[in-house]
Amino acid sequence: MAARVRIYGVITLAIGVLALGAAVLSWRSARRANRLSERAIRVSEDSNETAKKALAASREQFLKENRPYVVLAPQKFEDSQEFYRYELIPDRKAVKVSVQYRIENIGRAAARDIEVFRELKVGEGPSKARRIAFAPPRRITLGPREEYTMAVELVIGLKGKAAYDDYVRKLMSQAGTWVHVQVSALYSSEVEASERFKTKVAHRIYKRRAIVLKSDFERVDKAFSER
């Protein structure tokens, strides 16, 4: 009887050991499966992140290659083939000087809502611009290779008859005088409206030639004003 009890005890112990072993193996298998699952998740997340970066880079390259590019350049008047014209106002000791600029989009996408800002400085002599008339529309849109001619007029007041006569003499001379013009254009892309760009140029304009003093192009995040 005692022998049978011992045999049953051994069998019970063996069963318990086997059950414990099976539980340990099951736990280890589950733990390994969890590790493999976590690793697979990390690999998937890394793959998704890589795909997102690749997509973002591809989109950035597409926008870079398909964006508007506005250029600004002085343009001669057709009748005189000169860069500026003038009108004398002797009773006010003043002169009205007119210049014009060509705005052209040489990019691959339309330039939308172009806003143009200007700053003009008069040439030599004790003169001062009393009034500036600026004549582009408030906002314009130019498709690829489209252009628009912008007109600008200055009324320049001179201090006294001597200064006026001297300035008129320079205007009427063969060499003429010069006008400093700085123009900036802010615009967006038809491909991505949130992208804003700025073109800024400065020229010293003589009667028959124009010298580039500055020419910048940049991407901007928000509107600017140089009024």
Image: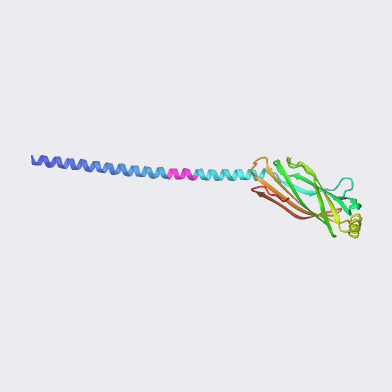
**Residue at position x 82%, y 54% in the image:** 129
Asked if the stretch drawn in magenta spans residue 44, the answer is yes
**Residue at position x 61%, y 45% in the image:** 60
Of 6 and 53, the residue lying toward us = 53
Quadrant for residue 55, please give it.
top right
The secondary structure making up most of the magenta span is helix
Q: Is residue 160 above or below residue 29?
A: below
Task: Judge from the rendering whether residue 68 lies leftward or rightward of residue 4; answer left or right.
Answer: right
The span picked out in magenta is 39-46
Residue 43: x percent and y percent? 46, 45
Residue 167: x percent and y percent? 89, 57
Task: Judge from the rendering whether residue 32 lies leftward or rightward of residue 100; answer left or right.
Answer: left
Q: Quadrant of the N terminus?
A: top left
**Residue at position x 21%, y 40% in the image:** 15
Of 76 and 25, the residue lying toward us = 76
Residue 202: x percent and y percent? 76, 54
Task: Judge from the rendering whether residue 106 lies leftward or rightward of residue 58; answer left or right.
Answer: right
Of 25 and 173, the residue lying toward us = 173
Task: Judge from the rendering whether residue 53 lies leftward or rightward of residue 108; answer left or right.
Answer: left
Asked if the stretch drawn in magenta spans residue 181, the answer is no
Residue 56: x percent and y percent? 58, 44
Q: How many marks?
A: 0
Of 87 and 149, the residue lying toward us = 87
